[in-house]
Amino acid sequence: MSWLETEIREQPAALARLLERQGGRPELAEPFRRDDVQYVLIASRGSSSNAARYAQYLLGRANRVPVMFATPSLYTIYGQPPRLDGAVVLGISQSGASPDVGAVLAEARRQGRPTIALTNDPGSPLAAEADLVLPLEAGEERAVAATKTYVNSLGAVALLFAAIGDDVVARDELARMPELLERQIELSFESAPPLEGYADAVGATVVARGVNYGTGFEIALKIRELSGLVVEAYSPADLMHGPIAAIRPGWPVIVVAPTGPAYESVAELLPALAEREARIVAVSDVPALLERVYTPLPLVPGVPEWLSPLTAVVPGQVTAMRIALLRGLDVDNPAGLRKITLTT
Amino acid sequence: MSWLETEIREQPAALARLLERQGGRPELAEPFRRDDVQYVLIASRGSSSNAARYAQYLLGRANRVPVMFATPSLYTIYGQPPRLDGAVVLGISQSGASPDVGAVLAEARRQGRPTIALTNDPGSPLAAEADLVLPLEAGEERAVAATKTYVNSLGAVALLFAAIGDDVVARDELARMPELLERQIELSFESAPPLEGYADAVGATVVARGVNYGTGFEIALKIRELSGLVVEAYSPADLMHGPIAAIRPGWPVIVVAPTGPAYESVAELLPALAEREARIVAVSDVPALLERVYTPLPLVPGVPEWLSPLTAVVPGQVTAMRIALLRGLDVDNPAGLRKITLTT
C-alpha cells in the first residue's frame, strides 16, 4: 500500500489523537477573548491555506470578528508590515518551516500581539515564534501530498472554535468525528465510481461555498498535485462573474454540496453548468443530487455542517489518488514536488 | 472596430477624466484617518476583486493597517455578519448592482462604520449604501469584459492612496499615468507578437506578486472570459506549494514582472518553469528578461512601481482580445456571459 493510502486510512486515528491530547486546553481561547481583539490574521501556504479558509468561516462565526489572510510580501519584500493593533495572529504550517509564514508571526510578536501556531512540528521555527502552540498530532507524514495533516489542521481549528465558545455541544459533535471520518473513508473506497471516463481529462473545476469553500480548494490542490491536471476552485458567485466562460462541454465540474445553508447556493449553479454541458461530479449526502449527476461521490449523512469539511475532503483525496494511479503515477512522490517548501 | 478595442483605446482619456473630476477630494481620506480605524474591509466580485487586490497592497502601505476581503456568505447565507469595530468598509463594483457587495456595505452602515463605494454608477444600489461615493468616471462600457472600468478602479484606488498620504509626489506620478497608459497601449498594439503558436492551447497560468498580484488575476480573467481558455493566477510562493505540479511541457506561463521589489521573486521562478518546459510569456520592462522568453510583452519604462498595475494589465487585455479573434470569437459578447452579474 502506498504511503498516501496508508495516511488517508490513518486519518481517524490521527484526529482522535489530536482531540485526546489537545482537547482539554481552555487557554487556547484566551487570546481571542482579549478586549482589544478586533480581527484574526492568518498566515499560511499550500494545504494550510485551505485550512485557513475553514478558519475564516469558523472563527469568524465563533468570535463574530472578521478573519483575514496575511499578505506576506508586505513583510518580506516591501518591508512595510502593517500595524497589527487589534489582531490575534495565527500561523498554520504543517512543517512550521516556511520563512514567509514565520515572518508574519515574528512581526506580530514584535508588536506585542498574541500569536498561535498550528503545526505538526512543535520544534519548528514557526512554533518558536508563537505564544501558544497547538500541535497537530498527526504523526509523521511521508507522502508529499498532505492528507492527515490537513484533516488535523481542520480538527485543530474546530478545537479552537469549541474552546472560544466554551461550547459543550460543539465538543460532543467534534468528539464523534473520528468515527464519522472512519465511515466516510470506508464509504469513499467502497463506493468508488468508475473514473475511466476522465482518462483524457486536462483539468477540472471545483465549486464550493461557505464552510466548505476551503474544501473546494483542497480537493483541487490534491488532484492537481497527484495527477498534474489543471484543477481550480471557485465559489459559485465568483465563477458566475466571468470564469464560467472556460467551462466547455465535457469539462468536469466537482460540486461540493453537503446539506447545510450553502447547499442551495451551489445547487443553483447546476442549470448554468448543464447548459455548458459540463460533466458534474457531486460530493454530497443529498440522494436527489447524487442520482442526477454524472459521477456521485457520496458523503456519510449526519455530519453537522460546521464539521462537514473533515469528511467532505475524503472523496476528493480518494479520487485524487485513484486518478493518479489510473495515470500510472507515483502517488507518494509527485514529479517535481517536495514535502517542505521554503518561500519568502 | 469592436467595442472591446474601442474601450481599450479609450482608457487614457477615461483615466484622465477620473483624475480631473475626482482628484481634488481630500475628504476621501477622512474615513481612513479616524482614530478608531484598525483595518480596511473590501467587498467586490469579478474584475473588481482584482482591483481590490491592488487596494490590499496600496492601502495597506498607505495606512499601515491590514486590508481584508469580506466573506459575503457570512452576511447573506449564514446570517452571522462579524462585528466590524475598527473597520473602514470599501465596496468596489463597476455596476454597483451585485446584492452580495451591497449587503456588506449595508451591514457596515448598520453598525455605524464608515463606508465608501467605488462604482461606475453613482445611482446604483451600492452607491446608496455608502457615506462617500467615488465615481469611476469611465463612461458607459459596452463590451462585456471590463477594461476601462478596471483601469479606472485602479486609478480610484491610487487616488485614495494619494489622498490618505496627502502625498504630492504620488499625485504628480499619478497625473502622468494617462500619457504613460497611452504609450503602453500603442506599444502593446505595435509590438504584438505572433500568437499562432498558442492556437491549440487549452489554458495558461499567470504568475504575479506584490502590487501586481491583482494584475495577474485580471490578465487571467480577461483571457478566460474572452477566449474560454482555462487561465488561472498564482503568486510564485503559492505556485511552489503544490500547484506547479500541473505545469507541463508547452504549457504557457505568463510572468508579470515589471521593475520593482517583487521582480526578483517572480524571476526566481523561471528555472523551475524551464525545468518543466513551460512556454514563458513575460510582461516586463526588463530587456534582459524579454530577450530570453518565448513571447515578450513589453512594458513602457519609467512607470513607478506602485502605479505599474495600470500599464501592466494592457498587454494582457490586448493579448486576450487577439487570442479571441484568432479563435473567431465575438470579443464584445463572450458566450454565456452578461455585463451585470447578480449574486448573493
Image (spheres, coloured by chain):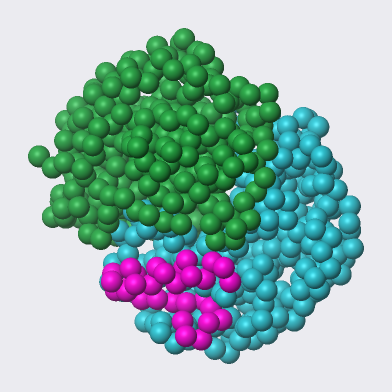
Chain colours: A cyan, B green
Residue at x 28%, y 31% (from the top left corner): B138
Residue B218, how many percent across, how many down?
37, 43
Residue at x 40%, y 50% (from the top left corner): B98
Q: Up-down: is B160 above or below B97?
A: above
Q: Is residue B29 visible?
A: yes
Q: Quadrant of the N terminus of chain B?
A: top left
Residue lying farthest to the top in this orientation:
B168
> In the figure, residue A82 lies in which quadrant?
top right
Residue at x 62%, y 83% (from the top left corner): A300
Residue B120, how many percent across, how many down?
33, 35
Left or right placement of residue B76 versus residue A63 in this view: left
The one of B100 and A32 positioned closer to us in this rendering? B100
The one of B234 and B286 positioned closer to us in this rendering? B234
Q: What span is in magenta?
A: A260-289
Q: Up-down: is B199 above or below A319?
A: above
Residue lying farthest to the bottom in this orientation:
A190
